[in-house]
Image (cartoon, rainbow, N blue to C red):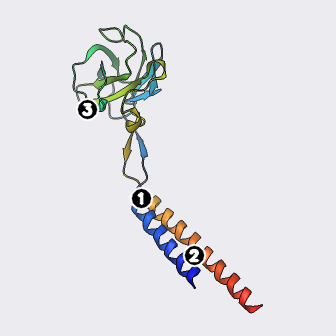
Amino acid sequence: MVKWLASAVAVALACVCALSIRPAAAQVARDPLIVPEEGGKGSRFQIVGQFGWAPGETVTLSFAFTTANDPLAYNGPFERDRRVTVLRDGTWSFPINVNDDLLSHPLDDTPGYIVVRAQSAGRTAINAFIFSPNGQRPAGAAAIAHLGFGPQNADPTLVGTLALFVAGAGALLIGSGMVRRRGALAT
């Protein structure tokens, strides 16, 4: 009886935990997308405007370097503008070399973020490249996770499905224990 009661309490606790835990990061692509998200001097990354840009308009790309923990909140100053034209499908792409010509000052070996602002007549978007010289990541990079993707709330269906799975597995364990116990008592 004690084992059955302990199993029932364990299943109930598992259900409560499963319903109260929110998955850490259902990911949605951030615009403009930066691929790859991280690198050092001499690396390259691609900036891609994926959606919401008006075909034919000009997008101005501005760059800045910061060591702030939240590079997506960076407001300037920006420097070294580059321009790209939006394609017919509302997208655009621009390659960047991470070298001393990118900004108005040379990049040293200080880990940080290269903030990219994409701005057109109707839209402004910001993202950041994690600058990790010699493999050293800037402070706060782990907390930001992938700058190319932003966290959103998890789908409640996923949490509910997980709770049902845990509850079903617990019920099966309890049921199989009861069947074994009855079989042991019958013999």
Q: Quadrant of residue 27?
A: top left
Which residue: 53% across, 81% down?
Answer: 5
Residue pointed to by mark 2 = 171
CB within 8 Å, label 2 to label 3: no
Identify which amino acid the numbered label 3 is placed on.
Answer: Ala
In the displayed structure, would residue 3 be above or below residue 13? Answer: below
In the displayed structure, would residue 112 be above or below residue 165? Answer: above
Identify which amino acid the numbered label 2 is placed on.
Answer: Ala
Residue 182 locus on image (x, y percent): 69, 88
User: Secondary structure beneath disc 1?
Assistant: loop
- In three-dimensional space, the C-alpha distance between marks 2 and 3, rounded to whole angstroms, equals 48 Å
162 left or right, relative to 182: left
Residue pointed to by mark 1 = 21
Q: Quadrant of the N terminus?
A: bottom right
Residue pointed to by mark 3 = 73
Residue 50 locus on image (x, y percent): 39, 32
In the displayed structure, would residue 60 be above or below residue 148? Answer: above
**Foreground: 69 or 157?**
69
Identify which amino acid the numbered label 1 is placed on.
Answer: Ile
Q: Quadrant of the C terminus?
A: bottom right
- In three-dimensional space, the C-alpha distance between marks 3 and 1, rounded to whole angstroms, equals 28 Å
Residue neighbourhood size for the residue with mark 2, other residues' Cα within 10 Å, grouped as few (<14), some (14–19), many (≥20): some
Which residue: 30% across, 32% down?
Answer: 70
Q: Earlier in the sequence, mark 2 or mark 3?
A: 3
Q: On residue 101, which mark appears?
A: none
**Foreground: 61 or 150?**
150
Q: Quadrant of residue 90?
A: top left
* Marker count (numbered): 3
Outermost right residue: 187
Q: Quadrant of residue 151?
A: top left
